[in-house]
Amino acid sequence: SIEFNQNTNKKFIFNFIVPNLQSVKEFTFSSSSIKYLYAPSLKSVDKNAFTECLGLYQIVAPELEKIGDYAFKQNVSLHKFPFNNIKQCGEAAFAACASLPNFMIKYFRSLTSDPIDATRRQDEIQQYQKGNYYLKY
């Protein structure tokens, strides 16, 4: 697993390549500048691990099975995500992730009551499902 201490400057983490990483702890990459994660052995992501990573675009983690609550909240650039092996998805794990493709949203909804955001208004959800990826927050 990986976690950074309070003194770690996460502003200079862009491409993170960790072949043997199996878990990411709470708040590890939160508010960091990460754009790409390659972790082929990653199995779990704890709650809030990647919250507010505004530039995170792609995650390569084909073994990922478990995602904690709010794990990727406000990752507005997240577009490529390994969803095929996900077995558990926490509440609001993808809140305000407006770039995720619609088919992924439907898949995540099958795993939990509301992986997107319990506070999102119904009309915004309908617009998102129609393919309009711009949401007001």
Image: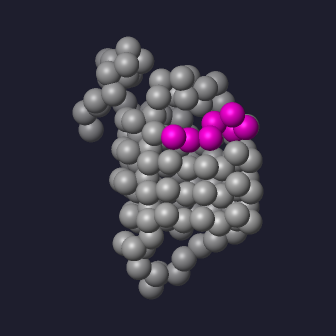
**Residue beneath the point at 60% across and 65% down:** 17
Q: Nearer the viewer, residue 56 or 127?
A: 56
Count every numbered label the image shows and give the total.
0
On the rendered image, what quadrant is the N terminus found in? bottom right
Residue 136, position as x, y percentages in the image: 25, 33
Report if residue 68 is visible in the image.
no
Q: Is residue 30 above or below residue 133?
A: below
Q: Please check the rendered image and state whether residue 113 is part of the magenta-colored stretch, yes or no.
A: no
Report if residue 97 is visible in the image.
yes
Q: Is residue 95 left or right of residue 91?
A: left
Secondary structure mostly seen in magenta is: loop
Q: Is residue 104 left or right of residue 87?
A: left
Residue farthest toward the left in the current orientation of the protein = 136
Q: Nearer the viewer, residue 36 or 73?
A: 36
Quarter-of-image position of residue 22: bottom right
Q: Is residue 40 above or below residue 95?
A: below
Q: Which residues are magenta?
A: 80-86
Q: Is residue 7 left or right of residue 87?
A: left
**Residue beneath the point at 44% across and 57% down:** 35
Q: Is residue 56 left or right of residue 71?
A: left
**Residue beneath the point at 64% across and 71% down:** 2
Residue 109, position as x, y percentages in the image: 58, 26
Residue 93, position as x, y percentages in the image: 53, 43
Residue 45, position as x, y percentages in the image: 63, 55
Picture colour scheme: one colour
Q: Is residue 9 above or below residue 26?
A: below
**Residue beneath the point at 39% across and 36% down:** 99
